[in-house]
Amino acid sequence: MPTLTSTQKKAHMTRRTTRVVLTGMAVALPLSLVLGGVGQAAAPSKRVDAGLAVMAATGLDDPHKKDIAMRVVSSAENSSLDWRGQFKYIEDIGDGRGYTGGIIGFCSGTGDMLDLVELYTRQKPGNPLAKYLPALRKVNGSDSHAGLGKPFEDAWRKAAQDKTFQNAQESERDRVYFNPSVKQAKEDGLRALGQFIYYDAIVMHGPGNSKYSFGGIRKTALSKAKPPAQGGDEKTYLNAFLDARKKAMQSEKAHEDTSRVDTAQRVFLKEGNFDFVPPLKWKVYGESFQINE
């Protein structure tokens, strides 16, 4: 899923009606953890600390951590932490990939939008987007709008009100991007931050093994440093991965703004926040964002 250049960013900003800069999700500790057992008074600090440590050590596939990841990615992709508000998003940002739409930026020119609409149509034949499948097949691999245009955009927004389509977007996000990247990160011995760094990379650059795809970026990083699973230092390896990621971004005009690496992921890494635990503060395109819990 492509991000925006500075020029595209300005155009993108004009379509936004709201901007979320601060959000959070409460995490409740079990009563037994807080009280230390029936009949006991105030919360024993050691037991509370142990509970917080368990939460900190969870991977990105923990529901709360996953939601945080979605919000941070959305800050770069949609200038908003409200990732669930992006099911209806659809536009051509001029990056050569045709339409970009939905919560993960499915593109009409790269095949994942076609896969999504095919899944939706299998689950719900006769949906508003079904009739555009022939056109989506024809434009795949190009930036063409042939057979699509405003009627397709309107149909996308209508479909986005359907829970079945929303679920299909989440399912394809997980199948193509989230699950493979988190699985690979765990195999490389990376904690939640590293898992997020992998996920954000595959979202932008796509799966595969070409030089500037996710697999190619990882291969370059492995040539420079060893991941923890191979006895390497986690911070050193992740810096090598981000170095390779920046080169991949700079190779394409649509990705030349590297702030999602420089003023977001590098910030978390410099802080040593390997468990990706709030509070998180970062910037993308100069905008400040924060997640408190």
Image (cartoon, rainbow, N blue to C red):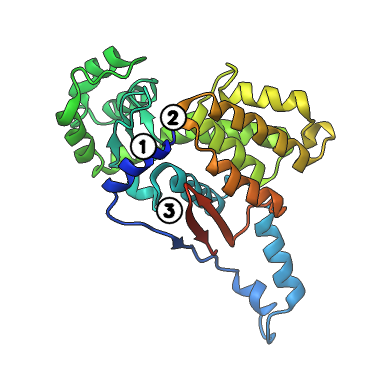
Residue drawn at x 66%, y 26% as measured from the top left: 218
Disc 1 marks a residue whose amino acid type is: Gln
Disc 2 marks a residue whose amino acid type is: Ala
- Please give left or right for residue 16 compared with residue 283 in the image: left
* Residue 196 seen by the camera: yes
For the residues bearing labels 1 and 2, Cβ distance under 8 angstroms = yes
Residue drawn at x 64%, y 46% as measured from the top left: 266
Residue drawn at x 70%, y 51% as measured from the top left: 270
Earlier-in-chain disc, 1 versus 2? 1
Tell us which disc is closer to us: 3 or 2: 2
The numbered mark at residue 8 is 1
For the residues bearing labels 3 and 1, Cβ distance under 8 angstroms = no
* Residue 126 seen by the camera: no
How many C-alpha atoms fall within 10 Å of the one at disc 2: few (<14), some, or many (≥20)? some
How many C-alpha atoms fall within 10 Å of the one at disc 1: few (<14), some, or many (≥20)? some
Q: Residue furthest top?
A: 138
The numbered mark at residue 254 is 2
Q: Residue furthest right?
A: 231
| Most foreground residue, 285 or 226 | 285
Give residue 122's position: percent from left, percent from top.
29, 25
